[in-house]
Image (cartoon, grey):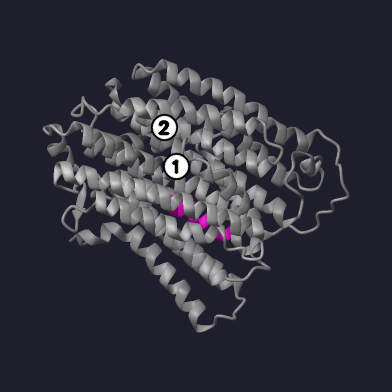
Amino acid sequence: MATQLPNWMALAPTLVLAATALVLLLIDSIDPDSSSRGLLAGTATIGSLAAVGFAVWFLIAGTGEEPISLYGDALVVDTMALFFAFVFASVTAMVSVASYDYLRDHSYQGEYYALVTLAATGMTLMAAANSLAVVFVSLELASLPSYALVAILKKNRGSVEAGLKYFLIGALSSSIMVYGISLVYGVTGSMILSDVASAAGGTELTGVLGIGVLMILGGFAFKTASVPFHFWAPEAYEGAPAPISAFLSSASKAAGFAVAFRVFTVAFPASQLANVDWVLAAQILAVVTMTLGNFAAATQDKVKRMLAYSSIGHAGYALIALASLSGGNDSFVLGAGMAHLLVYGFMNTGAFLFIALTEYWSVGRNFEDFNGLSEQAPFACGVMTLFMFNLAGLPVGGGFMSKYFLFGAAVDAGFWWLAALGAINSALSLYYYSRVVKAMWIEEPSGDLDIESKPVGLYAALATAALVTVLLLPGFGPVWEYATQAASALVA
C-alpha cells in the first residue's frame, strides 16, 4: 500500500535548507575557532543537494500538479514553487562547492555558509508565498543574509562599502514595498492573493490600489535589480566575494521574479484590473532595464562589473514575461520566462564562478588582465567562453533555447516590438561578451602571471555549471514542460 506523506512534507526543500543552516550554526558554535573548511562546505553542499533531490522527486511524482495550501493558504506548494526551489538549491550547491577554495584564507566561514543557506531558505519561501505578508517576510529572510554576505570580507573596504550601500537601498525599497502592501490591504481587506484579486476587481478606490500595486512592483524591481532600483547591483556584485555575486545575480534574481510572477498573476490579474495598468509599467521597465543594462555593460573596463551590468540586462529580458501577459497567451509567455530563469541560473552562476577562480589566482579585474589566460588555464577559459556565448544567446547551449522561446512567446502574444528590442540588445551583448573571449584566446599575455594551482572545488562547480548549460540545449524539453505546466496553474 502506498504511503501518503503529510502535506507539510511538500515544503521539504525549504525545511532541508533551514535545517542545514541550523546545523552549520551548531557546528560553528561548538568549535568557533575550527578551520574545517571541508566540514562546513560539505554540510552546506549536502544540504543543498538534498533540497535539489526533494524538488526533483516531487516534480517527477507530480506533487505540485494539485496545489497544496498550507497554514491558512499563506503558503502554496505547486509546480512553480518546486521548479524554482530546484533553481535556488542548485545554485546554492554550486556556490557552496566553489566557496571551499575561495574562502581558504578568510574568517567567518561558519557564518558564511549558514547565511547562504538561510538566504536560500527565504528564496524557496518567496516562490511558495500566497499571502502578501509572507511575501514581505520571506523577501526579508532572503535579503538580510544577503546584506551580510556582501560585506563579509570585513577587512576589504570595497566589500564593506558595497554591503552598506546594498543595505541602505534595500531598506528603502522594503519600506516602499511594505507601504504598498498596506495600501492594497486597506483597499481589499485581505493579504491572501486570491482574495485580494476578488476584492480588487470590484473596488472603487482604484487610485489608492494603483499606487499600492506600483509600490509593490517597485519592491520587486529592487530584488530583481531592475531600473530604477538597479544602482545597488554593480556596487554589490563588484564588492562582494565572487561566489556571492553569483548567488545574488542568479538565485536572488530568480526569487524576485518567482514571487512577482505569482503576485501579479494571482492577486492583480491584468484581465480584472482594467483601471490599474501595471502591464504598461512592466513594459516600460523591461525596455529601459535591458537597454540600460546592456549599454552600460558595453562601456565597462572591468570584467566583473561588466557581468554585473549584463545581469541587469537579463533582468530586462525576464521582465518581458510580465510585460507580455495581456496578449492572450499567458501560460506560454510566463512559462518562457521561468524556463529562461532556470537556464540563466546555471550559465550566469558559472560566469561569476570563473571570476571567483581568477580572483583566487589574483589575475586582476580588467579585460587586459585576462589577456592570454587560455595558455595557462585552457579548460577554465573554455567553459567561460561557453558561458559568454550562452549569455549572448548563441546556439551552443540552453541560453539559445531559453531566449528563442522567450522572444517567440512575446511575438506570439502580440508584443513583437519587445522581442525585437530583446534581440537587438542580445546582439549588442555579443560585443562585450566577445571582449572576454578575445582577451583570453587571441590577445598576447600582458603580464608575468604563472598559474600553478587547480582548485578542485572551483573547477568542480565550473564543470557542473558548464555541463548542465550544454545539456539544456538538447534537454530543454522537460524544462519547458514543467515551466508551462507551472505557468498554466497560475494563469488558469
The residue tagged with tag 2: helix, strand or loop? helix
Considering depth in this image, is 181 or 422 the residue closer to the camera?
181
Tell me the quadrant of the picture where the N terminus can be found: bottom left
**Is the C-beta separation of discs 1 and 2 under 8 Å?**
yes
- Specify the quadrant of the image occupied by residue 342: top left
Amino acid marked by disc 2: Leu
In the picture, measured across the screen, residue 358 lies left or right of residue 197, that is right
Residue matched to label 1:
224
The image shows residue 341 at horizontal and vertical percentages of 44, 39
- From this view, report whether residue 210 is shown above or below residue 65: above
**Disc nearer the start of the sequence (1/2):** 1
Q: Residues within 10 Å of mark 1 (few under 14, many from 20)?
A: many
Residue matched to label 2:
319
Majority secondary structure of magenta residues: helix
Q: What segment carries the magenta color? A: 88-98
Q: Residue at x 28, y 41 (%)?
A: 263
Is residue 226 one of those drawn in magenta?
Answer: no
Q: Residue at x 75, y 39 (%)?
A: 367
In the picture, measured across the screen, residue 242 lies left or right of residue 76, that is right
